[in-house]
Image (cartoon, rainbow, N blue to C red):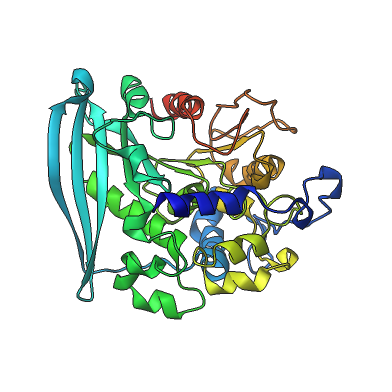
Amino acid sequence: MTRSLILISLTLLIFQPVSAQNYDEAKAGTYTLPPLLIDSNGEAVKNKNQWKTSRRAEVLQLFENNVYGTMPKVFDSVSFKVVNDQPGVMQGAAHLKETEVTIYNKGEQATIHVVLFTPQQAKKAVPTFLLINNRSPKNTLASRDTIMGFWPAEQVIAAGYGIAAFHVSDAAPDDKDTYQNGLLRLFPDELTRDNGMKAIGAWAFGASRVLDYFEKEDLVDHKKVIVVGHSRGGKASLWAAAQDQRFAMCVTNCSGNTGAALSKRNFGETVEKINTAFPHWFNTNYKKYNGNEAALPVDQHMLIALAAPRPVYATNATEDLWADPTGTYLAMRNAEPVFNLYSPQSHLPTTPPKPDSPITAWPLSYHNRTGIHDLTFYDWEQFVLFADRYLK
């Protein structure tokens, strides 16, 4: 994405007219969340077997049909080509690999470029963070000519983890006029159906194809891959984890509306706002809920619950009310009944933690960082601590 398009997107996110949305908790209104543990027949779901064999599939289908779109289950093939292999980078601390992951279907192909660093001294395959990069590719350059908190490879390598990234434009350009020019060329039926996937679905699908590659990569412990996303990428990381249970953990950073924050609260960004500004992100059916969130048969606590029992870490930033920090925390809390069908159980406090006071117990963790809508060194520090508890 060009710098000008990035600035336009950030402007849409941040500089909305104050009168156009609510930032007053007293005016957030009342709402009723769809029940997590009541199935379509009105029966209570009382144990993890009922959740796994019945209710989970119902909830997943509700999100497919009404929000994110269906995910292609079949394609012709996928190939992996290493185009750069350099041990001893980062002053000897890391092993760099760049790989082209190419998906083929119906005579079309699309390639996702993956950058991967792993600790040079690792004696075996390592747990690895995979970032769905929705900002400039400069954030994840293999050359590391600019070190940024958005993807601090050096920090993660020093902690003993691998760190990888791909850019969303390889899967679907983040543009309402050209989003179909990536992976969706391989699946034209998705574009013609009201419940077909669009950009965010394509980004999640792309993350799964990178995981296909990791299953063949000796440097990566493919059973311990943490999918990470910021903002719109955080929406995609949640959807990737919901769709693909091979991901061991999910991190969703400042993901807001149709990410980790509840949609039915009248606070910050709304379904109508997001569908109007970014009509290419979600399926056509989702437009029916513009100004009509009460009719949604799902809410984001149900999306978080689809990751269970795998851990989820959600974040916010104090100056990013657009992404509704309180609504995010409430979504995490309301996802707990599904996680608590498993062990260990989640016991988030009733009220959100103070800024910069992370809750890093698993399976559900959360923090609200002082600052703006961003992904920072501080955030990554907490993600590593969270992974240490769960994966090590």
Nearer-the-camera pick, 206 or 149:
149
Q: Is residue 139 left or right of residue 89?
A: right
In which quadrant is the C terminus drawn? top left
The quarter of the picture where residue 201 lies is bottom left
Q: In the displayed image of the protein, which residue is found farthest to the bottom?
A: 192
The quarter of the picture where residue 107 lies is bottom left
Count of residue discs: 0
Q: Residue at x 82, y 45 (%)?
A: 24
Q: In the displayed image of the protein, which residue is found farthest to the front?
A: 4
Nearer-the-camera pick, 337 or 143:
143
Q: Residue at x 39, y 68 (%)?
A: 178
Q: Is residue 281 left or right of residue 224?
A: right
Q: Is residue 47 visible?
A: no
Q: Is residue 327 left or right of residue 152?
A: right
Q: Residue 198: x percent and y percent?
A: 45, 67
* Relative vertical location of residue 190 with respect to residue 162 in this rendering, above or below: below
Q: Residue 108: x percent and y percent?
A: 22, 72
Q: Residue at x 29, y 54 (%)?
A: 209
Q: Residue 33: x percent and y percent?
A: 73, 56
Q: Is residue 265 visible?
A: yes
The quarter of the picture where residue 63 lies is bottom right
Q: Is residue 6 left or right of residue 350?
A: left
* Relative vertical location of residue 182 with respect to residue 82 in this rendering, above or below: below
Q: Residue at x 79, y 56 (%)?
A: 31
Q: Residue 207: x percent and y percent?
A: 35, 51
Nearer-the-camera pick, 7 or 274:
7
